Amino acid sequence: MRSISDCASRSGSRAAGSRGTGSGAAGSRALGGRNACRHAIRVLFLTLVLALAFSPCARASYHTFRERTRDRIRRLGPILEAIHFTGNEAFDRDTLLRYMFLSESGFFRTVHYRRRLLEYDLANIERFYVTQGYMEAQAAIEDERLSADSLRVEVLVGLYEGPRWEVSDVIFEGNAVIDDARLFRNITLRPGAPFLSNELEADRRAALDLYARNSYLDARVFQAVEMDDEARTVSVSYRIVEREQAFIREIDVTGDDKTKQYVVEREFTLKPGDLFDPEEVGETQARIYRTGLFHSVWIEPAEEDTGRADKRLVVRVRERPSGHIDFKFGYAALTGPEIAAGITNRNVQGQAIEMTLKGACSGFERGGEASVGDPWFTGRPVAAEATGSYYWNDEESYVAETAGASFILTKRLGGTVTLEGGYEFSRTSVIESTDETHDTGVNYTSNILSAVTHDTRNDILDAKRGMLARARVDLASSRLGGTNDFVRCELSFRGFIGVRHGRVAALSLLAGWVKPQGDDGDVPVNERYFAGGDGSVRGFERNSLSPLDSGGNATGGRAVVEVRAEVRFPVWKKLRAVVFADAGQAFDDFGAVRPSRLEVGVGGGLRLATPVGVLRLDVAGPVTEEGSIKYYFGIGQAF
């Protein structure tokens, strides 16, 4: 900051340097006058502040505040400025402070010193040392250093850690079925290891769990500890009562008021007469829950059978409502409102058969579909779904109506991998097309599809962690009764990583390629890829990132690449914010794919969790080319 004398000397030198002309002298005088005015205001402001600070009223207020502070300290104790430790070698200062209720005062926190509370904290520290094998540890207050005005205090805590005790031996008695080596592999306290007293109960439970995994549900494990004060060692002994292996006598299902009992029983991986296997029980519980018919599933042996070898297995379920209504609403600046609704009954007649009716209406699409699905087609754990649909598409480059039907078989492998295979048939009537190389008319697509999906998301609607990876191959051929011949390959990926403090990083990838196989070497316009807009690359007009004809109309491409990334973070209660970057492009063919040709859009948005779903508002604009800001509103996450 320049001083007043510096400014005065500079203005004086400028005035002296311009005395040769009248206009220069007048300008210097005007500038000097303005500077002098500014300096006068600063001096006046500083004088006013000093006058207020040293005024009798200010001094009285300061003394009143100081007296009130002293009275508060007399009542609550001096301010704890610092806690020091001496004699601690095994654990550092930060570790010890975690076991104390008292903490040091900081810039935003004032802590008053209470000796009784500190003594309680020192007892906690001693207990912590004991759990870590320091059986003779002691903690005491060595000094309390008050400041000259008795307003602040620093405390010195002295520690005697002593030697660390060890485990001399571990003895097992009564174990005939499971040998010592297997038991040792499941416990923490072993001969020669430090004696950690907090691991005693954990080791006993680990031994019980090992027996339970081998169907010995009624086994008992008793633990005893002998301490040698001279050698500072501990001997741990276990007395085990194994009893008989448990087997399942019968299985009862309760809570299935609407659902047929066979729907639950067909998910069992065990049956009466089998040994009680906790892993199989867990797998059965997971399979029943994955049907989507129940809020909760709980499986346990009947309480009255405790001590008996034969167990009655009780399966308790709580049913979900079988009816479900979906409603989605969205808005894009270019296409206007988008509305979709659906009604589903996923447990028709209590047989887990699902029937769905959906409809959608927007500025570019109208239509609906009906489907029926059976999770156990022909009595086997293979799901089957039959769907019929009709849609009217009014795109910028073509207008078409499509009627189709499909039959898909799905087989789940484990809990996360799903295999799909089936047949699709569609009739598309292209009423109008702006692409001169493609005439209007009717074409048929008859194709066989196959897909594999790996899904580990924790929530399919609003995932916070996990991934969804999917690979699909379609083979359309005129030999199957269609007019189109092509092979379609698609790879998609969605990954979600939960970061600290509720933040979520999300990534979506899509790569697709359609290769013509027929004599004409072409793909119908309704089977091509289009990119741009909400659900694709935000910040661009719908279908604008696609190959164009001579008239500037989007004609679609045979290949597409899309990359979308988001970072979601909480703002306030159920309100979250998101920043994102999307990139993508549809290409004429696979050989034309270039990462440098991807168009990029960036933006941000808000997410509000409501009973009907996550409300989404996004604002995005292009980066790689000029364009206006686009607005998107909808229900549910972008991906």
Image: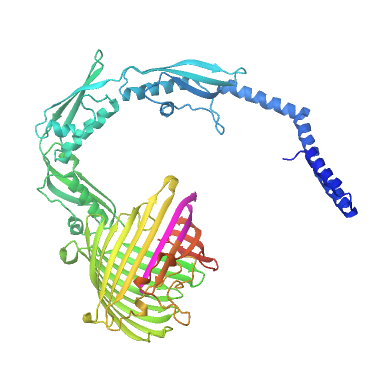
250 sits to left or right of 438: left
Range of the magenta residues? Answer: 558-581
Vertical arrangement, residue 193 with respect to residue 470, above or below? above
The one nearer the camera, 481 or 610, is 481
Q: Residue at x 19, y 57 (%)?
A: 261
Considering every residue shown, the one lying at the far right of the view is 22
Main SS type for the magenta part? Answer: strand
Residue 572 among magenta residues: yes
Q: What is the x, y in percent for residue 458? A: 34, 53
209 sits to left or right of 465: left
Q: Is residue 321 visible?
A: no
Q: Give the quarter of the image for residue 433.
A: bottom left
206 sits to left or right of 547: left
Location of the C terminus by quadrant is bottom left
Vertical arrangement, residue 157 with respect to residue 420, above or below? above
Residue 86 among magenta residues: no
